Image: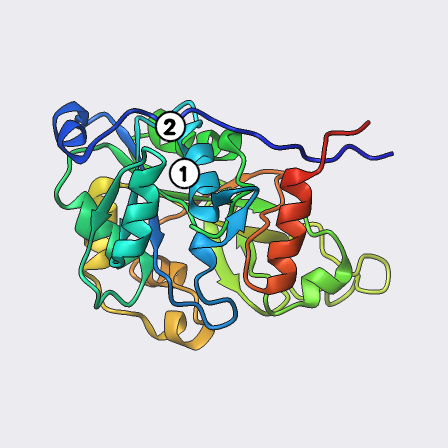
Amino acid sequence: MAARIGVLYFDVHPNSVERLAVTLTESSVLAVIPARLASTRLPGKILADIGGKPMIEHVYRRASAATCVHATIVATDDARIASAVEAFGGVAIMTRPDHVSGTDRIAEVVGQLPCLAVVNVQGDEPLIEPSTIDAAVQPLIDDPTVAMSTLSRPFASADEFANPNVVKVVTNLAGDALYFSRAPIPYPRTSAAVEPVPPAARAHVGLYVYRREALLRLAATPAAPLELEESLEQLRALSHGMAIRVVPTTHVAAGVDTPEDLDRVRSLLLSPVRT
């Protein structure tokens, strides 16, 4: 039988807001989880129970377990989320309620703190692998010219390649993003019958790492036409000439958007490991 994912518990770093302000330096890597209760398809999912713990706790513990991460913070405008985070020993910082995106919410927090790089960890990804966070951060550590990075993975099927809910990314030969789209790119003009998914096509994994100054600059930049057309915030960076390094991974993100997603994640997290 195929291996199943068992329950993983990670120690939360013993941070407090006061301590973070002292211990973070200009060489630190900070993971920030933007979190709000509003959700069109699954309201309140951030606090949904998974094995007796709110979903945000699973995300927080996995982000904190990344080797490169020095501190983890939840950025929220809801006191219920902040209380839940503080209850398990995590750190929450309250932000303004009028942010239109998670990036803007993160920028408000990061503007108060010193760090080298910021990892934007989605609050509805309780299965995020700490090693994928490390992989995404590494380019910014290795190369001071890299301002932003993200992840991509192979497509699981031709249906996934055609699915507009799965974002596609294509890169140049250096590994930087050329474009992100909900449409199937690149278009397989001559090889569709043989290879319905072009070899160059990759699925985007929505985890971002920013150099601090790049994040603050991006958050202060108005939305770009392509960003609004595709409803993809990363197109703002490309539209304004910011390169995005795309790191390949085999990790398949398991975001929770629907009740069915939540049931699947509960099953994966709570099932005993089998071989």
Q: Secondary structure at mark 1?
A: helix
Give x and y (percent) for residue 71.
29, 30
Q: Are marks 1 and 2 in contact (CB under 8 Å)?
A: yes
Q: Is residue 179 left or right of residue 141?
A: right
Answer yes or no: is residue 136 visible: no
Point 60% across, 56% down: residue: 262
| Mark 1 or mark 2: whose residue is earlier in sequence | 2
Q: Is residue 235 above or below residue 70?
A: below
Q: Horizontal and vertical percent for residue 32?
A: 32, 43
Where 17 sits versus 189, above or below? above
Q: Quadrant of residue 64?
A: top left
Tally of numbered discs = 2
The tag on residue 246 is: none
Few, some or many residues within 10 Å of mark 1 (<14, 14–19, 20+): many
Q: CA distance from mark 1 to mark 2?
A: 8 Å
Question: Which mark is on residue 60?
Answer: 1
Name the residue: 65% across, 62% down: 260
Of the 4 image quadrants, the one containing the N terminus is top right
> For the point 50% across and 60% down, which residue is it?
180
Question: Residue 92 location in percent, x, y?
Answer: 26, 43
Residue at mark 2: 12
SS of the residue under disc 2:
loop
- Between 94 and 209, the one lying in front of the other is 94
Residue 256, by quadrant, is bottom right
Residue type at the position of mark 2: Val
Q: Nearer the viewer, residue 30 or 19?
A: 19
Q: Given the image, on which type of amino acid does mark 1 rest?
A: Tyr
